[in-house]
Amino acid sequence: MKELANLDTFLSSDESPDDCMMLSDLDGYLTGIACSPEVIPEPEWMALALGGTLVEVPEWVKQTIGALFGNILQKLQNDPPFVKPIFWLAPEGDAIAMDWCAGFIDAVSLRPRKRLRLTESGTQGHLMPPHAPHAG
């Protein structure tokens, strides 16, 4: 997908905000946002993904991230839900899941008490651990 390649290039460039997420951790983060037990407003999660600011980020970047999030939401609504994480590849071709998982955990940290209640409910405690998409 050309849009993701362009987004990856931007996020890795000197034009991007200093503390913005790279593509793999952004994908894990957006998956974590989509799995949240509470709706997290887009301006909140978008700003955090882009280093805390939306001021100097081109509109096409925000739109591409929004489209990626929408795609993740759509895949999670499938029966069964389907996640295809964006992992970095080692030179040997092995997937590197660490950044994706770190992004997922960043999303979990936005509403930790809400997620903890799910694990304590007895009926809704089947949370997707951040390594689950990599395990299969």
Image: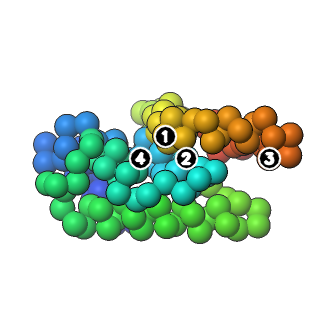
Q: Name the kind of residue labelled 4 in the image.
A: Leu
Q: Name the kind of residue labelled 2 in the image.
A: Gly
Which residue occupies 59% across, 68% down? 74
Mark 4–mark 2 contact, CB under 8 Å?
no
| Quadrant showing the C terminus | top right
Which residue occupies 51% across, 66% down? 71
State which quadrant residue 120 falls in: top right
Q: Which residue is mark 2?
A: 32
* Secondary structure found at label 3: loop
The crowding category of the residue bearing disc 1, from other C-alpha atoms within 10 Å (few below 14, some 14 to 19, many at least 20), is some
The crowding category of the residue bearing disc 2, from other C-alpha atoms within 10 Å (few below 14, some 14 to 19, many at least 20), is many
Of callouts 1 and 2, the N-terminal one: 2
Of callouts 3 and 1, the N-terminal one: 1
Given residues 129 and 112, the one toward you in this image is 112
Disc 4/disc 2 C-alpha distance (Å): 10 Å
Q: Nearer the viewer, mark 1 or mark 4?
A: 1
Disc 1/disc 4 C-alpha distance (Å): 14 Å
Estimate the x, y position of residue 65 in percent, counting from the top left: 37, 60
Estimate the x, y position of residue 83 in percent, counting from the top left: 62, 55
Q: Which residue is mark 4?
A: 26
Mark 1–mark 4 contact, CB under 8 Å?
no
Q: Which residue is mark 3?
A: 124
Q: Which residue is mark 1?
A: 110
Estimate the x, y position of residue 58 in percent, counting from the top left: 18, 62
